[in-house]
Image (tube, rainbow, N blue to C red):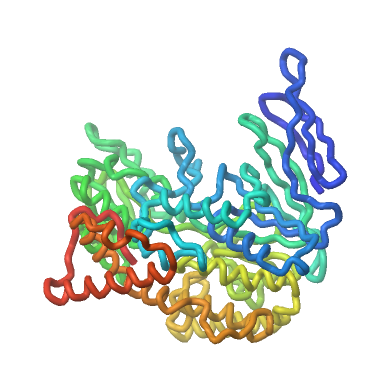
Amino acid sequence: MYHDMEGHGQLGQRVFQVSQCGVVLIAGAALASGQLQESFQVPSTSHCQPTKSIAIVGGGSGGLAILKTIFDLPEEIRNGWEVVLFEQRRNVGGVWLPDPPGPLPRPPDLPESPLYPLLHTNTPHPTMTYPNFTYPPNTPLFPSHEYVERYHIDYAEHHDLTPHIRVHHRVVSANWIGDGVEGKWDLEVQVEPDVGQVVNVRHSFDHLIVANGHNHYPHIPVWNGTEGWLANTPPGTPQREILHSVYYRLPEKYRNRTVVIVGAGGSGRDAALQVGKTARVAYQSLTPRNEPTPGAHVVPKPRIAYFTNTSVVFEDGTSLDDVDSLILGTGYDFRIPFLSPPHSSVLAVDPETAYNSTTAPTLISNLRYIFPTHRHIFSLSPQLPPTALAFVGLPVLVANCPSDIAQSLLVAHALANASVLPSRGAMLRELAAREAALQREGLDPYYVGHRLVSEAESDHDYQDGLVEYLKDVGALPHDGRKFVEPWRRAGRRDSRLLGRAWERIKERGEEAEWLDGVRTEAEWADVMERMAKWQRVYEEEHGVPEFVDQLVWYV
């Protein structure tokens, strides 16, 4: 049930009435004239005495996946459950929902989304879809963000999820009131019933599922000398700046500037392709294991060592004294403020922690890895029961929607029957074995974090493993099929080839010839198979092409 916390805003103090089943009636707000505004409601999904209460945080692909999967459970199992999804923004879609109208925030304030207008998917959309829910006919194979945003909205509407979603509801804090055996979550939620109005309410839940993504809090490298460099912009040149890619929007901003793009991840490579066309000169600063973005007009440079008042100095001793802007494609930190101090003590944040998954006294984020967790999902903190806190969407370098469904299947069945999971001790031993396997491959599990880069743990193998486990324990029937269909594996394997094919198809204006009437998963799979064969034949004769207008780095 919700409880009165506080009311504040331009319209004055609110009067709360909590109904028998948890609906908060905000009876009015004092106006200057002394009149009362019409009453309105802060919606609550509380039922009278629910048999189980579940809060989901985040309305992106992960939140929608777990919400839908819970309601896919047999009705006799979930009868009486209270399930509510809190989304702090204006709609579902997560990272694919653009910024609201208005100017972009400046540091240290963060934009709502890292989305930039030229953003497209860098893998074929059929490989990224929720099972049995395809994109509409004639959707470009590598669609722009508008298509992906609409896809998530369509998914929520088609599966009647919207009655359980609360937009403009930001979870401020989540505290576990209990121990490692039993307890309740105490959530403080900030609600925006209307423009200029903010209300804080409290609600208790049995289970908390965190699905708020991990592309919000930028990771900013620290170099000596940046303050002096920024303070000494040469006369007659643009103000020097160092900005993370979370603030990147359009390449035109960098016209006739000298730019250093740091990093070779998705945003760094997209920036290299886009900014390289408009900048006076664009450099790409790379780690030794990375190469410049194919097709980008960039000059490769090693990692940055430090700055002077006049120059950017690199690890090989070379320097540049005419740089105007740096774009940091350096990734994001794993932060969950509503679980961490000062709002909560559930998740400790310590980049230099000496604890490991076996010795950790609580859940810890070193900013790259949240541990200890069972299969990147369930908290194994000794302070919480294993099903009290689950994460959906922690893995990186995956096709999010199908991966989120695979994770959600395990979460939903564990919520229905906690004995689906092994004991905490067994799960900790499994986690230790996984981390040891990474170390044998020369990978540091506390640096790799949730990135599925191991040869023994590809994103598809990870998804299959989750579903096979459920079959082995009798939660799902053995049907002789893998969760990840062969055509998805083939589409991901051939993603770069298909990207080059798609660039050729666009140049030839033949999109409709390939996509007209394509609706089902089988039909999209057939298109990708035929397109890959077509491109292979071309490249065997002509070699691998480059495209002047390419704006997306295909993975």
Residue at 73% in and 81% down: 423
Residue 228 image point, x, y percent: 35, 43
Residue at 77% in and 30% down: 14
Judge by depth and name the residue closer to the eye, 312 or 433: 433
Q: Residue furthest top?
A: 33
Left or right of 327? Residue 210 is right
Residue 526 image point, x, y percent: 35, 72
Residue at 59% in and 75% down: 375
Left or right of 137? Residue 191 is right
Position above or below: 158 against 538:
above
Judge by depth and name the residue closer to the eye, 370 or 503: 503
Residue 483 image point, x, y percent: 52, 77
Left or right of 202? Residue 209 is left
Q: How many marks?
A: 0
Q: Quadrant of residue 377?
A: bottom right
Position above or below: 369 against 304:
below
Q: Quadrant of residue 467?
A: bottom right
